[in-house]
Image (cartoon, coloured by chain):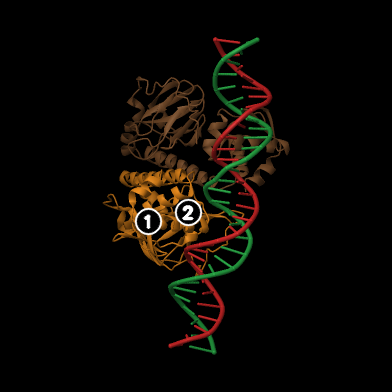
Chain colours: A brown, B orange, C green, D red
Amino acid sequence: MLTQTTSRAGSFKQPTMALRQAGPASKDPHPGTIEMMGALVPFARNSEIYGENEPADYLYKVVSGTVRTYKVLVDGRRQIGGFYLPGDMFGLETGDEHTFSAEAITDCKIIVIKRSAVVALAARDNDVAREMWELTAHELQRVQDRILVLIKSAQERVAGFLLEMSDRASVGGAVELPMSRQDIADYLGLTIETVSRTLTQLEKSATIELPTSRRIVLRNRSALTRLNA
Amino acid sequence: MLTQTTSRAGSFKQPTMALRQAGPASKDPHPGTIEMMGALVPFARNSEIYGENEPADYLYKVVSGTVRTYKVLVDGRRQIGGFYLPGDMFGLETGDEHTFSAEAITDCKIIVIKRSAVVALAARDNDVAREMWELTAHELQRVQDRILVLIKSAQERVAGFLLEMSDRASVGGAVELPMSRQDIADYLGLTIETVSRTLTQLEKSATIELPTSRRIVLRNRSALTRLNA
DNA sequence: CGACCATTTGATATGGATCAAGCGATGTGG
DNA sequence: CCACATCGCTTGATCCATATCAAATGGTCG
């Protein structure tokens, strides 16, 4: 069902990074403290950040670039869990192991934070514990919303996606898509052909413009909102 | 798309309950403390426990019976967020308002816990804060899994549902379904007809038995697992 | 320029939705 | 206690949105 487009280019994984350990960060913490506890690590386009079933020893925060998390089913279908843009945290899935894999879609700079340090700190500092709770709750909200997306029609999914991205990756009137059609399809639970067709359809109805395949101008936002049902 | 089967029978909502307030529970807390802070409230079959967009002032834990959470889209489609059986907590969605509604599928007894009390306690007690984090993370895990379900075929969804329910509501070899076909359909993102047809199909292939429509015997669990892909 | 990869476009197939009856269990009123 | 209405479920016939298969186009990089 999926033609394994997912290139696994320079699979270099956890690059034995010199983590600046939590050190003095333990005193005087405040909201936003958590990211102070990590090291800034660069990841190349298409490189793996972590793999499914690996121990979830780290949390991640995007500084620049875009990340996708995903899961590949036995039959090859790939479901993208989410796209993470600068400012977003990811990797805070539940248990001891990651339930998704994560890859850099573009070259990225990512803050990598040792989970044990956060957990230890959270045990002493309520603000940190609450920040973790809030981050998890926020992620829960995001995933809840995705469930609603997956029961909608192709038009509704694509319209919703465009609106979502325009809120998150808008650069002067246009949406700049860092991800491929295959990524979008696997995110929305559609095929690339359906995504492509839906976009051209929206273009023909003057709802959007497609200067290039990765750049989209929303011409009629209310029409999209209406489609979003 | 949905023939609003969702009866709103005795819509009596928050029954001005005399909440046994947190009182002495604030001292000596330990894992599992949270539920000690609530009152046991009965809800009748099909009654609303809370509505979408209502302030999320309470958390809930099922003692007996079954609960569904759901959301109705503008066009009438209904998506069930989850089924909650004895021992399960629900209502811990993110922000200040519930993003789903909750109804009793059967007569229920439910522990109702004031959120503000939990939050206040969590601010002082790390174990409580961590318990909340874990509960939220657990719910996140559950919703993550549901996303994968929604990209699968009808057979896969139904097979997965049966396996899930047999782990959760098995009574001596048979699965006892508290919910209607419409509930199952709205949970899996299918129609009642497709759910029904898939079940008869599984019955014909001797994978399951259907002594009654609400009672299902799994005859060939490995076949279901295989279908579950 | 030519090879390659991403995207679009076209033709056809199909799984599940929709529309429409039928059927069995449950409950109600005569 | 039975006739009948109701409700939840199943089954059948048809339709349609999206997948699948296939090919053309366009953009990028050596």
Taking depth in this image into account, of B111 and C10 the one nearest to the observer is C10
Please state if C28 lies on the left or on the right of B171 as rendered.
right
The three-letter code of the residue at mark 1 reads: Ala
Is disc 1 in the same subunit as disc 2? Answer: yes
Query: How far apart are labels 1 and 2 at the CA level?
Result: 25 Å
SS type, badge 1: loop
Q: Quadrant of residue A71?
A: top left
Q: Residue B75, how many percent across, how many down?
A: 62, 55
Q: Residue tagged by mark 2?
A: B187
On the image, the x and y values in percent for residue B14 come to 47, 64
Residue A156 on image: x %, y %? 61, 44
| Horizontal arrangement in the rendering, residue C26 relative to residue A201 (left or right) | left
Name the foreground residue: B172 vs C10. Answer: C10
In this figure, which residue is indicated by the disc labeled 1? B206
Inspect the image, locate mark 2, and give the three-letter code of the amino acid beneath it: Tyr
Image quarter hosting the N terminus of chain B: bottom right
